[in-house]
Amino acid sequence: MSAGKNCYSKFIKLFSKGGTTYKYFDLAAIDSKYGQLPFSIRVLLESAVRNCDGFNILKKDVQNILGWSPALKQGSTDVEVSFKPGRVILHDYTGVPAVVDLAAMRDAVVELGGNPESINPVCPSVFVADHSVAADFARSPDAMAKNQALEFERNKERFTFIKWGAQAFNNLMVVPPGAGIIHQVNLEYLAHVVFEEDAADGSKTLYPDFVVGTDSHTTMINGIGVLGWGVGGIEAEAVMLGQSIAMMLPEVIGFRLVGTLGPLATSTDLVLTITKQLRELGVVGKFVEFYGPGVAELSIADRATISNMCPEYGATVAFFPIDENTLDYMRQSNRSEKKIDIIRDYLKATQQLRNYADDSQDPKYTHTITLDLATVVSSVSGPKRPHDHVPVSDMPHDFKSCLSNPLGFKGFAIAPEAQKASGELQWTDGKTYKLSHGSVVLAAITSCTNTSNPSVMLGAGLLAKNAVEKGLNVAPYIKSSLSPGSGVVTCYLKASGVLPYLEKIGFDIVGYGCMTCIGNSGPLDENVVNTIEQNNLVCAGVLSGNRNFEGRIHPSTRANYLASPLLVIAYAIAGRVDIDFEKEPLGVDAQGNNVFLHDIWPTRSQIQEVENKHVIPAMFHEVYSTLELGSKDWQSLKAPEGKIFSWDVDSTYIKRPPYFEGMTRELPKQQSIKGARCLVFLGDFVTTDHISPAGTIARTSPAARFLAERNITPKYFNSYGSRRGNDAVMSRGAFSNIRLGNKLVSKPGPRTLHIPSLEEMDVFDAAQRYRKEGTPLVLVVGKDYGSGSSRDWAAKGPLMLGVKAVIAESYERIHRSNLVGMGIIPLQFLPGQSADTLKLNGRESYNIILPESGLKPGQKIQVKADETEFETILRFDTEVDIAYFKNGGILNYMIRKMIS
């Protein structure tokens, strides 16, 4: 921070401690309204004040944030603000394409006569390789070793490229594969909570930690009072290069917690309840801030679980202001006492240390909602969406209803006469098992949502111990797995003595990474798959994750339920999701007595006793002291050197993208879109998994054909997520989800109708044909388009297919930003209008009339579809969005900025 250049330098205060001088901005002295602001808005304000230089961040940005009030309403009193995050985190599924883009940007800068090293992160960035490992092997002591070996065999080229990036770019730290899940590593190790930045005069500048990440669940860090959220990979690249973020000042919803959780309730039950309530309220694009005496009753891990699922209820952040419990967690996770003392002093000085029992500290919020923790009951969510909350007691009825209901989020359209269908499964133990609707075939304790929380992980271990001692087991055909979010979990599972029981019941540790939650569940046994397909069975996956969208977890599990790790084990033992745990036993013990779930379920007090004894700072030190070294496989990788990457034209993993081909210093001419055709015609809640899957590459897909033509066998197809550094593979993967509901064709799948020939074909093949014909493309979609993961290839893929614009009823925040970032025009139907009300069928020819100059955020844009004319809203939300579009996207904008 340079005081001479800062607009608010006169508000800098100093204090000394331990021989060091610390500087910080006295925010309360700037304006008396400061103390009335929500705590999350105070962090935004500090960032704007500290970075206010009159150029990137203006005084009006600071004044706009200071002017936040409960009366602010998004859409009617929109206020644009700019600010700069303090750091960026990336995982390898988004990080590899980000580094590919940066390498290609260097090439483009050279071709335009600039300095390639101008393309370099100025914002500290951390790359965590956590998405590549898959649960190919499970239920064996050597499963993890086999999965890690296969991970390196498949991904050697990608990992070598990551190593090149680490030496080619400054300010880029790489956490090697096998360390854990990005958000858990962020929580346990990377988070500063308060930055201490070295100044030229030997002092240190203090300011709140503030992070953006290329994964929507970056919000997990809100649980320890660090402001952060997910952005698209494209926007993250701009932030890395020093670009500020522009957004509309958000409404802030106050979520008041009172009471305490019951003895049998878990944090997972709580977050699924909150997800349902906030989805019903509607919090898309808003901040949620938790307050009330009930917050103090939650551990930091419980709070992080709630913050983690923020994208599932649609908010931008789910913020828990820092209190003394937060500082206790820092101590538990091996942060130093000196660091904790400085944080406390800074937070007190800037009115950012929260006492949840003191209601005089409660800010005024846009709207408030209250939940009594005592009302939370054991729950799951599914079978297709995270916010479809189902109390466990209702599961038998709910699943039966889903079988009968019309095809949709809560329906499978199974005819009454087919609901009793079943199939026999011959297994290697010589026994015959029966599969029917509701049979569990996949059970995974997975995902940062829960594996970061000792209470539910130790609870699962204690339940497994009790189950084993009662003689219960999991059927051998069920693929069960345990993928911790960090090595700390393994440490306390071992220390507490529960790990052998988890292994005994079939939940062996299979690796450290996202695994099943991201769709890397690996193959199911072919006999299981064949039995499901031959009998058209709706079989189930149960996972402790945060996403259960169609086709994400495994192609053969049409019903997928999110549940606590304890319930994952319970349903695996039961073998079906339609069990009534109150009335039906899980099995019998050695004496022939029925064993019910309540007989083996540990209470919160029992779990807490074990946690207090076995989750200690030494474990965090042991795991994180060698974080950056990586495994022997990682250390043996030899990466190329140099600042310019040498592209291998034969690579199917890393390819120079075509975004900057033919780019000039001049802006491209803005043109209307004429004679466009609709590539796919979609309904509501189309997720980024539908648009650009991350999981398995189907053997009959265009991407599979492309790889097979290059002599790559199916074993080494890997996943779409792992191949995001190659646009030739990824463009073929766009809209390749087997559950894609394209209304232009008769059944779900990755197919579409070419207009006007009316030939049905793969989406990629249709796009190629339109390209040869010189026909631009649009997408016509329903509500919440682009929900789910912050996946930049969900924008890059359509762009590569020739899509120029999307017309939707509404957008998910990050995906709209990604579309803008790639130069695709996001249009929105007027309120009350939709494709249905306008009687569109997707076979029309579309003309989108853009003004020759003077585009403005939110202006009306005329669209003509054959003879139907209608207005849409241009969903460029800020002037910065307009600048990105005029340049052809964020990255093109940054290149021109660097060479100008």
Image: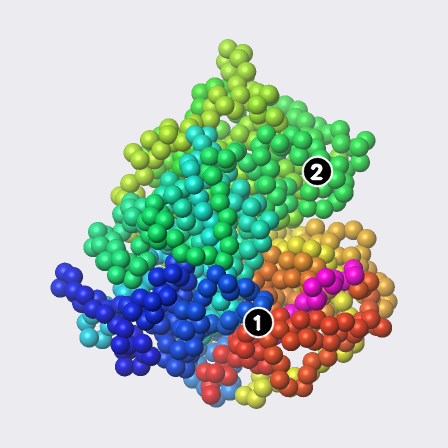
**Can the viewer see residue 878 in this picture?**
yes
Which disc is residue 877 wearing? 1
N-term mark: 1 or 2:
2
Tell me which secondary structure the magenta stretch mostly adopts. loop
CA distance separating discs 1 and 2: 39 Å
**Relative to 443, residue 840 above or below:** below
**Relative to 261, residue 659 above or below:** below
**Circle 1: is it few (<14), some (14-19), or many (20+) Cα within 10 Å?**
many
**Circle 2: is it few (<14), some (14-19), or many (20+) Cα within 10 Å?**
many
* Front of the two marks 1 and 2: 1
Residue drawn at x 37%, y 35% is 493
Residues 217 and 856: in front is 856
Q: Amino acid at mark 1?
A: Asp
Residues 407 and 29: in front is 29
Write down the region rendered in magenta: 822-837
Q: Amino acid at mark 2?
A: Cys
The location of residue 622, given as percent across then percent down, is 29, 46
The quarter of the rendered structure image containing the N terminus is bottom left
Residue drawn at x 55%, y 16% is 594
The location of residue 5, given as percent across then percent down, is 31, 81
The residue wearing badge 2 is 402
The verdict on residue 830 being magenta is yes
